[in-house]
Image: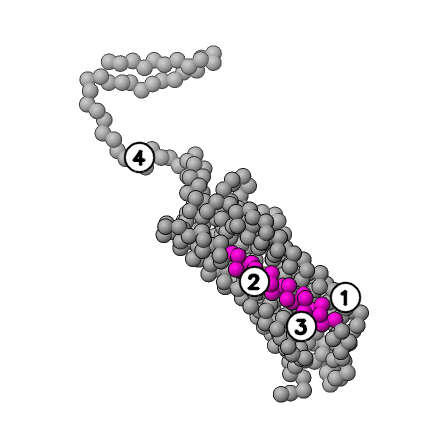
Amino acid sequence: MGLFDGSIGAFVVGTLLSTFLLGVTATQAFNYYKLFPNDRRVYWWMVTGMLILDWVHTALSCFTIYDWTVTFYGDPTHLVNSPFSFAVDPAMTGIAASVVQLFYAYRVYVVGKRRLFLPIMIAFFSLVQLGFACGATGMIFKLQAFSKFQSWTYGVSIWLGSAAVCDVLITGSLVYALINSKTGILQTNSICDRLIELVIQSNGLTAACAIVDAVLFGTLSTSYHVTVNLCLVKLYFNSLLVSLNARAELEKHLMGPRTSGNSPTLVTASGFGASDLHGFPFAGLPIAKVYVSTTQHVVSERCEDVNYEKHLPHIPKRTSSAVVKPVKRMESEGSLESDATTM
């Protein structure tokens, strides 16, 4: 093993992976803006803020590598102290994690039929990890030297452990709720299965990386945990975007293709498919009931724009000696008169 594998090497690999994931999140963000330009402002600003944070985080990670390998190339003494670009990494990671975790805490609240225990637990661990992440940034600025930072390892352990516990709670509670939402309706079950796949693919991956980060930090004296840690901002952001963009796929699955730019019309109990239209009273219902209610709502909403006469089945006229002339309606001084006559 080389002299710098556990220090610069870990940062280089982590920065490469983080930059690769930046392309993934940028593509997901582009799809979000394309599909939902008129989405709820809170979601729009949340995605925009996370996108800016993501790019700034990548730029700072690249600057750290440039500072060590170019500006101070051949000067091992410069590796003793942490550059400011890495010092802000814990705070940025904690902010990204907290935003996404609180977003999912609300989703758990919705799918859990408005029960507060699990959402409060998720919010608690999310705020704990945010506090200790910001504390880690403060301690790095204060101590400067990496060797001195060993005195505050308990704070980093609490930060990474709380983030991992929070992600596990989110993943487990959503999967459990979606499994219990299955009914005898085939289409409803297929939606639940798809949502479970999304939860495991996005939240499960984030939870696994948070656990690996915490374990590597607690068991190794090298900086290998940084390789995983530098990817967490992207993984959290991607988890958020997957959840928001999945609404278009689910609506297409149920209602057919949607017009780009419109607000989502599909509402599912999991929150993946919205609760994003104001005034929808059934966000907490089981998915089967939500599907029926949503269908009825959309049908009634579109009745005004469709000429249903041409879609009605042809009804043969009755043969009768009586012929009824069309009714003529005339407005005269606010009254309606009819001259229908029978021959």
Secondary structure found at label 4: loop
User: Can you identify the residue that label 3 sits on?
Assistant: 62
Instruction: Return the disc, 1 or 4, that comes first in the chain's sequence.
Output: 1
Q: Is residue 162 magenta?
A: yes
Q: Is residue 241 left or right of residue 252?
A: right
Q: Residue 13's spot in the image, x, y percent?
A: 61, 77
User: Can you identify the residue that label 4 sits on?
Assistant: 312
In percent of the image, x 69 and y 69: which residue is there?
156
Q: For the residues marked 4 and 2, what is the alpha-carbon distance in whole angstroms?
A: 53 Å
Q: Can residue 247 be seen in this view?
A: yes
Q: Residue 165's spot in the image, x, y percent?
A: 60, 63
Looking at the rendering, the stretch of residues picked out in magenta corresponds to 152-174
Crowding around mark 3 (Cα neighbors within 10 Å: few <14, some 14 to 19, many 20+) is some
Q: Residue 73's spot in the image, x, y percent?
A: 73, 83
- The image quarter containing residue 77 is bottom right
Amino acid type at image mark 3: Cys
Instruction: Return the disc, 4 or 2, that comes first in the chain's sequence.
Output: 2
Crowding around mark 4 (Cα neighbors within 10 Å: few <14, some 14 to 19, many 20+) is few
User: Can you identify the residue that label 2 sits on?
Assistant: 168
In percent of the image, x 46 and y 47: which residue is there?
286
Which one is in front in this view, the residue at disc 4 or the one at disc 2?
2
User: Can you identify the residue that label 1 sits on?
Assistant: 138
Q: For the residues marked 3 and 1, what is the alpha-carbon distance in whole angstroms?
A: 21 Å
Secondary structure found at label 2: helix
Q: For the residues marked 4 and 3, what is the alpha-carbon distance in whole angstroms?
A: 65 Å
- The image quarter containing residue 211 is bottom right
Question: Does residue 223 lie above or below 24 as drawn?
Answer: below
Q: Closer to the camera, 120 or 289?
A: 120
The N terminus lies in which quarter of the figure? bottom right
The C terminus lies in which quarter of the figure? top left
